[in-house]
Amino acid sequence: MKRLWCGGRRVARALHAVVSWGLVGIVALQTFYVGWAVLVQPGDWRFHTNLGHAIGGAIVVAMLFCAIGWMPARFWLAGLGLYALYSMQYLYLYWPSEAFRFLRAFHAPNALLIFGGALYLARASWRLFAQAGPPRAARLAVILGAGCLVIASGRLAGAGVEQGSGTARPVVLAEATEADVPTAYRTMTSPFPLGDARAREVGRDLVVSRCTVCHGTDLTGQTVGRVEAASLVESARTRSAAFLMWAVSEGSRRGMPAWKAQLTEEERWQVVAFLKSLAGGARPGGTAP
């Protein structure tokens, strides 16, 4: 029984090394996808976004193997610290307060901290694994496993992009028409009565915290990198509620995220309620023109 326990612990530690080095590779691959979204396909952050989910998953799996392998406390602390940094990425990206909007800029430096922490964890995990004196084949298996994990994560990120490129997600929202709105969105109805003041108020707060960073504080559009973000004021006048709900939910290939992953259906209808109020002269700050 003791031999079985020791063997399982060694395997868990080896797998921890695989996942840890895989995590380093995944974070490094993220920098490639940043370059893709800036220089190759301006505004296309879908690969970067999809791969970001793999980082959190790898950290959680590494901590699971840490527990099974009965690894020292420093590995637990490193894992928890990495997950805290990973969580901060979302907080920086969607910082709710306009007063401290500058904190969103820490999204990039925080990524460097994640890379450094992942590298520390991977090197420490490898040293612990190597202390057991594994044969050369086992060491090679760890290296190949980490490489396969990075490749698989990259392919899954690409697969997620392909799955999201059907009729629900047009190539460019600006080129789409009302006829492009999928039936599923055409048949949806808002749970809020027309002119619901509370829905508009909540929608305004959601728009200010999530949309002004790209569409401008007055929502009339601006250039982000090499992408021209649309005027939401103009969209409110020319697009139907169904089109807006579709756009908010599914996003665009030009960089707009699919908010259905972060906002409930009710919240998205509240966003639409506020956007439609822009056609009547409302402003992001809630005042009349």
Image (cartoon, rainbow, N blue to C red):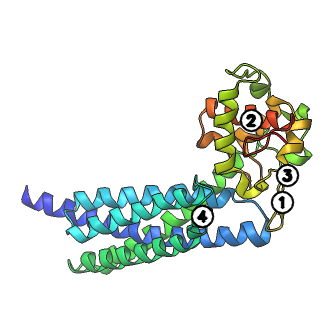
Q: Is residue 174 visible?
A: yes
Tell me the amino acid under the disc marked 3: Thr
Vertical placement of 232 versus 75: above or below?
above
Q: Looking at the figure, which quarter contains the N terminus?
A: bottom left
Q: Position of residue 226 (x, y in %)?
A: 83, 67
Q: Which residue is mark 4?
A: 104
Q: Specify the quadrant of the image occupied by residue 163.
A: top right
Query: Would residue 62 appear left or right of 100 to someone viewing this image?
Result: left
Query: Would residue 228 appear left or right of 51 to someone viewing this image?
Result: right
Q: Which residue is mark 1?
A: 222
Tell me the amino acid under the disc marked 2: Phe
* Of callouts 2 and 3, the N-terminal one: 3
Tell me the amino acid under the disc marked 1: Gln
Q: Residue 220 shows which numbered tag? A: 3
> Is the Cβ of the residue at disc 1 closer than 8 Å to that at disc 3?
yes
Give the Cα distance between marks 1 and 3.
Answer: 7 Å
Give the residue drawn at x 32%, y 59%.
Answer: 63
Q: Which residue is mark 2?
A: 274
Q: Position of residue 190 (x, y in %)?
A: 71, 23
Give the Cα distance between marks 3 and 4.
Answer: 21 Å
